[in-house]
Image: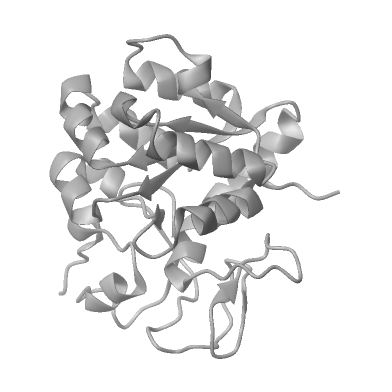
Amino acid sequence: MAQCTAPVRGHHSAAAAAACPACRHRSYGGYSSYSGYTPSSYPSPGSGGSSYGSNGSSSRSGGGSRPRWSRAGSSVSYTPAQIVSLTPVRQVVETRAAQQPDLRDVFLCHAWDDRQESAKELHDLLVAAGVKVWFSEKDLGLGVPMMRAIDKGLANSKIGLVLVTPALLTRLPKEGVADKELSALLARNQLVPIVHKTTYDALRNVSPMLASRSGLDTAEDSMTVVAKKIAELVAIYA
């Protein structure tokens, strides 16, 4: 029987899902942890304009797709894989916003070396898009371990963003971030990796657990578009 490659390779794109010998003939929705997959209707690569079932998205004929949380008239389009990955995160946003309306929208975890460059760029774009950001550069002191930053940031925010850069890949092994800690965070659907100037393959070599969760990638979208997608993901409309 064919074995699913997601725990090793991740299905962070429609092409990756199509290449998996166990999944190429199936359909999947969002997954909540390293090995937990929820059946749903997953469009086959190149299907273009089909609609999605339980992930609540609508399709745009001949182009990208719009998830259920994107407002009518939005110009931002998503790949099928992004909708699958972000749908369970959106569910967490809605739940936490209802329980704790005063939470900030996101916290941004990043490598110290990125604080004045890519992390600041993403922070500024998010703020300009109306997102309330818990930013470790402003909200934590120097030398705070990464997991402590994540724990504190998540306690004060709806979801977390992990900006994955070459600097972060260098830092992760030094931080001693355990797979079991990341597994718990990923299982709660509160973390969204944003890969920038590196690849999921490079992340997988350092942290297979974090790489098992699909997110956004600046090789596919500009940083500006990434910020717009996060802004839509966390927005709660009256």
Q: Residue at x 59, y 89 (%)?
A: 61
Name the spot of residue 113 as percent of width and height, x first: 29, 27
Residue 126 on image: x %, y %: 59, 42
Q: Is residue 127 left or right of residue 21?
A: right
Q: In the picture shown, does residue 203 fall above or below 123?
A: below
Q: Which residue is drawn at 41% across and 34% down?
A: 185
Location of residue 128 (image quadrant): top right
Between residue 38 and residue 197, name the one nearer to us: 197
- Which residue is pictured at 38% across the width and 57% down the height? 218
Q: Residue furthest right?
A: 238
Q: Can residue 123 be seen in this view?
A: yes
- Which of the pair 21/227 is nearer the observer? 227
Residue 38 in the image: x percent, y percent?
A: 45, 61
Q: Is 166 displayed left or right of 161 in the figure?
A: left
In-front residue for pair 24/60: 60
Of the 4 image quadrants, the one containing the N terminus is: bottom left
State how the image is colored: one colour
Residue 188 relative to residue 71: left or right:
left
Q: Could one spot residue 23 in this view of the protein? A: no
Q: How many marks?
A: 0
- Measured as percent of width and height from the top left, residue 187 is found at 42, 40
